[in-house]
Amino acid sequence: QQQVKQSPQSLIVQKGGISIINCAYENTAFDYFPWYQQFPGKGPALLIAIRPDVSEKKEGRFTISFNKSAKQFSLHIMDSQPGDSATYFCAASTWQAGTALIFGKGTTLSVSS
Amino acid sequence: NAGVTQTPKFQVLKTGQSMTLQCAQDMNHEYMSWYRQDPGMGLRLIHYSVGAGITDQGEVPNGYNVSRSTTEDFPLRLLSAAPSQTSVYFCASSLSWTGANEKLFFGSGTQLSVL
């Protein structure tokens, strides 16, 4: 049973466009929703994260939108740049001690110049 | 400050061989974990530890063993390698034992091929 479903699997966006990646979750106990960015040959790195007490969080060109009732959250990359080309993973976890971060399957973003 | 260090970066094994993937962190992190990354499958948790002497299984633990004798080290052992274990392995750590709700720091990965 996949607990975090991510779409699309791949995405091609023109430079300057908006990239949108969506995730849906099933476990209502999840209360932490990070996004990780991974460049080829590197380990993932935390990009931005949100907790369910807010509906949106923005850091620079990156924004997480969170819809608790729909159990969905999404990453928006404004003014997408070729340097944003990477694989993006959404994830979710609960606050319970010892629980683990559950990742989506990833989205490969290519920003064409 | 090296962060999370994984060795080796690349490894080729024959079916049935055993080996240990090393992971060390110098940030005094309580939480450490191992993930495997396969195309189209994302990152799947193998084992994790919330402190020295404490380990637990993740989503895909079969064929792997771990131990945590020190805060710094969290080795992953493949007991009898199988082609299905061909993957890229990532070690990750975070500051506190709540682990999942903190920023995870990942190593650069070990690419393992089992022939």
Image: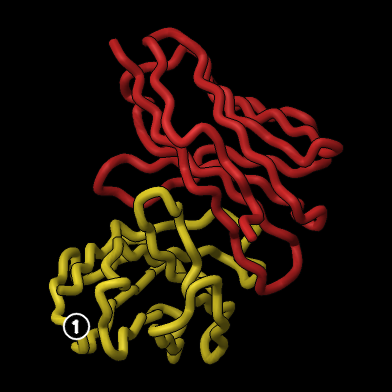
- Dot 1 falls on a residue whose secondary structure is loop
Asked whether residue B1 is in view, the answer is no
For the point 38% across and 43% down, which residue is it? A38
Q: As displayed, is residue B72 above or below residue B9?
A: below
Please give the letter of the chain rendered in red.
A
Please identify which colour was used for chain B in the image. yellow
Where is residue A62 shown, x and y percent of the image? Answer: 55, 25
Dividing the picture into quarters, in which one does residue A24 lie?
Answer: top right
For the point 73% across and 60% down, which residue is it? A94
Question: Which of A71/A35 is in front?
Answer: A71
Question: Which of A14/B67 is in front?
Answer: A14
Residue B66 located left or right of residue B8:
right
Where is residue B103 shown, x and y percent of the image? Answer: 55, 53
Where is residue A87 shown, x and y percent of the image? Answer: 40, 38
State the quadrant of the N terminus of chain B: bottom left
Taking the view exactly as shown, the residue that stands out farthest to the right is A69
**What's the coloring here?**
by chain
State the quadrant of the C terminus of chain B: bottom left
Dividing the picture into quarters, in which one does residue A13 lie?
Answer: top left
Q: Chain of mark 1?
A: B
Amino acid at dot 1: Thr
For the point 51% across and 32% down, which residue is it? A8
Residue A60 located left or right of residue A1:
left
Count of numbered tags:
1
Question: Which of A71/B109 is in front?
Answer: A71
Residue assigned mark 1: B15
Where is residue B108 shown, x and y percent of the image? Answer: 29, 57
- Mark 1, Cα crowd under 10 Å, few <14 / some 14-19 / many 20+, is some
Dividing the picture into quarters, in which one does residue B99 lie?
Answer: bottom right
Q: As displayed, is residue B10 above or below residue A83?
A: below
